[in-house]
Image (spheres, rainbow, N blue to C red):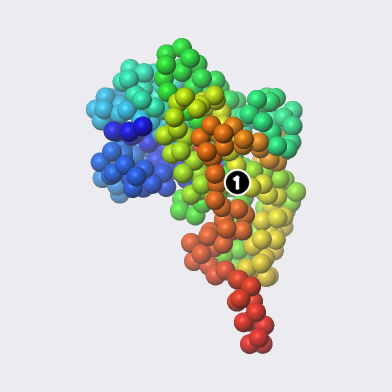
Amino acid sequence: MTFEKILVTGAGGQIGSELVPYLSEVFGNDRVIPSDVRSNSSDNRFISLDVTDRAAVDLAMDKYKIDTVFHLAAILSASGEKNPELAYRVNIAGLYNIFESALKNRSKLVMTPSSIGVFGPDTPRENVPIETITRPVTMYGITKLMAEYLGNYYHARFGLNARGLRFPGLISYKTPPGGGTTDYSIEMIREAVKGKNYVCFLKEDSKLPMMYMPDALQSLLKLAEADDSRLKHRTDFNITSFSITPKQLEAELRKHYKSFEVTYSPDFRQRIADSWPGSLDVSAAVQEWDFHPNYDLRATTEDMIVNLGGKIRTRESNFLEAANR
Ligand code: NAD
Ligand code: SER
């Protein structure tokens, strides 16, 4: 599939700030239009766009002849619990505007990331399939589940090519996360690299599915380019690379920072984490579009440390250090 003009909404966020250069590299700078409601970008392609403003969305889609949208503008789980009304408006009204405008412009594709937030406390805990009990208990999860249904509806009813995948917690170093429950993982790595200890807002045994950003980016593009005839699902693919508890991440970090310590002081985000599963069944993504992540916990941690300016300890460096003592 070729994409002539790609609009990225929420381009200033954790994913968008990395997806824009990634798509620009693949398709060319002039094919990608980054947009966000926050206009702090030095990128001269950047346009200011509030997705809840239907007229502004229509204008942008028409002006730039957009045929593909990566719709990332959203309010995440923890921020959504602080401001449920905003989460509803951005995640539902914003998505509706994008779908309607994409239809009007005969766009080829709208990519709408979903989340493990669609699951709830009644969902089975391990190896959770796509079709299962969902019943989310956060405004974020409710809006994400509705977004999946809306995408399926627009496809079935109007033929809109809406596609999406349920991201787990994403770990990355370029742009701070936007207020999610899985953000502890990024905070913990950052503090370890700074030589500080960390107070974790989740319990030490809260197991959640995770993924490193390079795997998230390549997965988005793989699904976007997947042959339609292979897709049995559309908007709700489970994907994940590994599952960890905060305690496991702490142990992984201590391999590199021996004196690193974490204390556990759960806050309101614990209730959100408790409602999400520990691991996911990703077989549909593998079968339908060859999902294949490359980074496990160790590779993710080491790459994060190096990119945050820290030093990793290898078996070799430990051996040399011991020999020099
Ligand atoms: P983020 O919070 O880092 O970025 C979201 C961006 O949307 C921000 O730059 C914000 O300014 C922008 N935005 C907010 N309201 C807007 C509006 N009215 N109009 C236009 N832009 C607006 O989020 P992210 O992590 O980049 O997430 C992108 C998508 O991926 C979301 O749909 C999210 O649900 C999904 N997702 C992310 C994760 C994760 O761990 N990061 C996990 C699962 C799913
Ligand atoms: N990382 C996201 C969050 O915690 C999952 O959707 O909100």
Quarter of the view holding residue 256: bottom right
Task: Tell me if 219 is positioned left or right of 276 in this view.
Answer: left
What residue is drawn where x is 49% and y is 41%?
A: 219
Label 1 crowd (10 A; few <14 / some 14-19 / many >=20): many
Q: Is residue 80 visible?
A: no
Q: Quadrant of the N terminus?
A: top left
Depicted 160 relative to depicted 75: above or below = above
Q: Which residue is mark 1?
A: 241
For numbered disc 1, what is the local secondary structure?
A: loop
Q: Is residue 239 left or right of residue 9?
A: right
Relative to residue 312, is residue 258 drawn left or right?
right
137 over 321 or under it: above or below: above
Mark 1 and ligand 1: say if the CB distance to the nearest ligand atom is below 8 Å. no
Of 125 and 308, nearer the camera is: 125
Q: Is residue 105 visible?
A: yes
Residue 146: x percent and y percent?
56, 22
Front position in the image: 37 or 64:
64
Q: Splitting the image into 4 quarters, where does residue 5 fall?
A: top left
For this orientation, the residue located farthest to the bottom is: 324
Q: Nearer the viewer, residue 250 or 198?
A: 250
Q: Residue at x 49, y 66 (%)?
A: 309
Q: Which residue shows up at 42% across the image and 34% down it?
A: 225
Number of disc labels: 1
The relative height of residue 141 versus residue 256 in the rendered view (above or below) is above
Residue occupying the point 53% across, 31% down: 288
Q: Position of residue 240 (x, y in %)?
A: 60, 42
